[in-house]
Image (cartoon, rainbow, N blue to C red):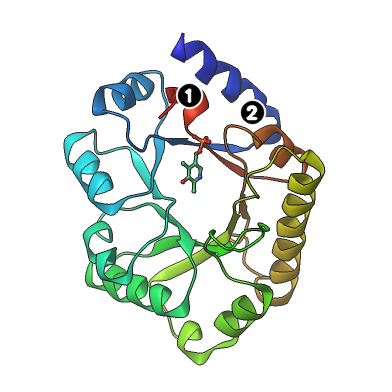
Amino acid sequence: MANDILNKVIEQLKPKNVTLVAVSKTKPNEAILEMYNEGQRIFGENRVQELTDKYEALPKDIQWHLIGHLQTNKVKYIAPFVTMIHSIDSLKLLKEVNKRAKQNDRIIDCLLQMHIADEDTKFGLDKQEVTELLESETYQNFENIRIVGVMGMATFTDDIQQVRQEFQNLKSIFDNLKSTYFNTQDSFKEISMGMSGDYELAMEEGSTMVRIGSLLFGKR
Ligand SMILES: *Cc1c(COP(=O)(O)O)cnc(C)c1O
């Protein structure tokens, strides 16, 4: 049953070359292994403790993405192994990721989380903050992080038009950043948007990476 859904989603993503991040937060290792055995390798978690526990217990070729808010003092626990951090929302956090990546002799892929929702509760940078970050001298000296794109979460609403607009906004922020700061960098290519309820809409609006949890694993 679960496998049918996974395969259906994968078939939808394939023609558009969209990457699936299977969001396994709160789900037991057995559920992750089941999906791993179907071929899925990219999993997303939003808590550092849970992520490190699962990393230790599960196969080492899993690519772990941190998708939730990240506190500076917890970066050190995931820096040795995390594949991508979707939730960079300050220069201070990026600085810590760079420092810990360096200590581990790694370069960590990061997404800039943009505030696109009409809600105060969601983290993220606004347009001015992202400009300040990318133009700061501190950022330009980082050698152990790589900004590979942007991430955003739409407002939790039934208003499809609003969600569509917010995704369009993120796509346009991506395009602007690309042409202004990452013109020559092919690695700046990811737009992480879309969850269980809105990933089809997100794909219509240019998503390259969807983060799907409950649709694959069942309700939390
Ligand atoms: C939980 C979570 C998801 C997945 O949500 P579903 O609705 O279960 O697909 C995606 N992105 C983030 C940042 C999350 O915290």
In the image, residue 171 lies at what x, y percent? 74, 56
150 relative to 78 in the view: left or right: right
Q: Amino acid at mark 2?
A: Lys
- Residue, far top: 1
The residue drawn where x is 30% and y is 76% is 99
N-terminal label among 1 and 2: 2
Look at the numbered disc 2 and say if its residue's Cβ is closer than 8 Å to ligand 1.
no
Residue 164 picture quarter: top right
**Disc marking residue 16:** none
- Residue position marked by numbered label 2 in the rendering: 14
The residue drawn where x is 52% and y is 66% is 147
Look at the numbered disc 1 and say if its residue's Cβ is closer than 8 Å to ligand 1.
yes
* Label 1 CA crowd tier, 10 Å (few <14, some 14–19, many 20+): many
In the image, residue 68 lies at what x, y percent? 42, 53
- Residue, far bottom: 137
The residue drawn where x is 60% and y is 63% is 114
In the image, residue 90 lies at what x, y percent? 47, 75
Q: Amino acid at mark 1?
A: Leu
Residue 219 picture quarter: top left
In the image, residue 6 lies at what x, y percent? 51, 20
Is 95 located above or below residue 97 in the figure?
Answer: below
21 relative to 83 in the view: left or right: right
Residue at disc 1, secondary structure: helix
* Label 2 CA crowd tier, 10 Å (few <14, some 14–19, many 20+): few
- Residue position marked by numbered label 1 in the rendering: 216
Q: Which dot, 1 or 2, sits closer to the camera? A: 1
Residue at disc 2, secondary structure: helix
Q: Report how far apart the C-alphas of labels 1 and 2 lie in the structure.
A: 17 Å
The residue drawn where x is 32% and y is 71% is 72
194 relative to 50 in the view: left or right: right
